[in-house]
Amino acid sequence: MSHNLIHIDKDICTGCRRCVDVCPVDAIHGQSGTPHEINLDTCVACGQCVQVCSSYLSEFESTPTIYAEKLAKRGMLSSVHEPLFAAYAQCHTHEVKDALANKNLFTFVQCAPSVRVAIGEEFGMPLGVLTPGKLAAALRRLGFDRVYDTNFGADITIMEEGSELLHRLTSGEGKLPMFTSCCPAWVKYIEQDYPDLLEHLSSCKSPMGMAAPVFKTIGAEIDNVDPAKIYSVAVMPCTCKHFEAARPEMNASGYQDTDVVITTRELAQLIKDAGIDFVNLPEEEFDQPFGEYSGAGAIFGVTGGVMEAALRTGYELLTKEQIPQLDLEFVRGDNGLRTADVALGDMTVKIAVVAGLDSAAKVLESVKAGTCEYDFVEIMTCPEGCMTGGGQPKLLLDGHRKLAFNQRRAALYSHDKDLPVRKSHENPSIKKLYGDYLGEPFGHHAHDLLHTTYTPRKVK
Amino acid sequence: MKSTKFIVADADKCIGCKICEVACHAAHDNLNYTVGAQYSAITPRLHVMQVNGKYVPVQCRQCEDAPCANACAIGAITEVDGKIIINEKTCIGCKACLVACPFGAIDLRPQIHNGEVVTQPRLKTLQDADENKSVLVAYKCDLCAENETQACVAACPENALRVYNALDDSKAKALQSALALHAI
């Protein structure tokens, strides 16, 4: 299934092939020393080529006219004046700017966990600086009518995915291992490369995918607005989320649940375009009720975070006892595969955490061969989870990547530690959402809004 | 006797990724880490050139008898600690050094101070009479004079760049020749 999200500019590409080395699906082709091309059928739009590309448009080869034409072709605002590199993600900032200027629309926005530990970098703040308050303030000043949060969506995901896992473990229905389904690049990958294993994917939508239909149904009711007039924007660290949001089945609200997705970088460009002084913004809160989140929701941004959040809730739902230790160090780490045996009451659950599709392929091959012992596997495409996503601020130098990753990770864990509620099922707004609207987690109404199906998409 | 060191690239190793250029900019002109926080254009002091389908960066040789320094009318180019350095504060942008340099290793660019382009005190252009012209100065590789390591050398993923000491290298080669002669 093709998309139009990631490109290589032939005028700028030198054919150094550093992007080829990081592409997890071998979608980039070309002869060394000549401009390369991306096969958009196989490309999973993870954007890691965008992050690694170092061939930029030199001042000596450019003019203001050439620069302006390139901005326009990339869908970038004309106010942008950063260096342009050969590999790029198509921008959607104009759509957001137009929607915010349209007085007939009621605008919602949600922000992924990882945006708040990276966006400050685009304003010269330290790497991994934690800025949820300034982020909310900036979105409000851009003119969004409701400033909601994907972290709240992450808490819903835990309620659903945790319940789904317990159901698969205890009822014998559904395939094991169960794979997480938050990462759209991973989902596209399994749909096209391992279509026979799709039943192993959790039916849960991603946190963004769950929050969006909640906004356009329950959120519309709360604000008493016609859902047809709601324009819902998602800010993601991810270049593939646009692909996920555009899937035709993402319309549980009766409308396309998310109207447009922009990346962390694009949001920074919008903030600069509006002349907002991000660094000196006051700390503000996200709007209620869909802006309240737990520490478990916050750590979705890092590899192992979904697993840790799920275990915190799964343990307590199953055993009806408090989990003795909240910081589950054994699932934390960086690239590759981590495994553990976790005791949930009388049951031992074998879990695995995967960052990177090369490690994912090994797990998938073991499932195919019937040798996979895991019950539950978290899989993310990007090197260390979403905070290292293709839509995050691009580090100028490779040497600063690890430093940035470490700081962003530390910021997400410290955010979790400092939040008053650290388990998804204890988030008061989550309790209210289920109590007042959704009923039982993994129940009938929840299923209609929050779960999805997958399609085999074997690339010929 | 001592000679100046210089950075030289191995054309067989260079893949043309231009990260040496980006690293050069980061080391000299940039306080921020990310692309979105770059407030000046990337103006590197070495340039990756493509010749016959191959790439290789070109930069200053730190010439012993520096033609650029000998051509400079105001003495803005001097040898400092074994490096040929252009004083960008006193440079008047006359371009004599660009003409004199046999390697094309010197360029002109706007002078930047604290991230801002410096403008002329009075000089304007006829086309844009409201704004003073920016100050253009000569600049080139200074072997990262402010730092202990060289940014381009450190950033190259292929280890194609190195700091070369021609005299030491020559002595080492002479020693190898002598050993070879003994072996005969």
Image (spheres, coloured by chain):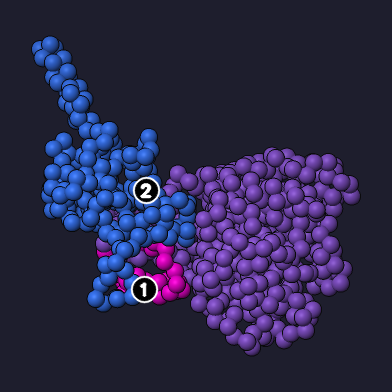
Chain colours: A purple, B blue
To which chain does the residue with label 1 belong? A
- Magenta residue check for B144: no
Which quadrant of the figure has residue B42?
bottom left
Q: Are marks 2 and 1 on the same chain?
A: no
Specify the amino acid type for callout 1.
Ala
Give the residue at mark 1: A68
Residue at image coords 26%, 36% = B80
What is the crowding at mark 1: few (fewer than 14 residues within 10 Å), some, or many (at least 20)? some
What is the crowding at mark 2: few (fewer than 14 residues within 10 Å), some, or many (at least 20)? some
Specify the amino acid type for callout 2.
His
- Where A404 falls versus A156 (above or below)? above
- Residue A150 showing in the rendered view: no
Is residue B17 toward the left or the right of residue A418 in the image? left
In x, y percent, where is residue B162? 28, 36
The residues colored magenta run A61-86
Which quadrant of the figure has residue A256?
bottom right
- Magenta residue check for A70: yes
Residue B28's label in the rendered image is 2
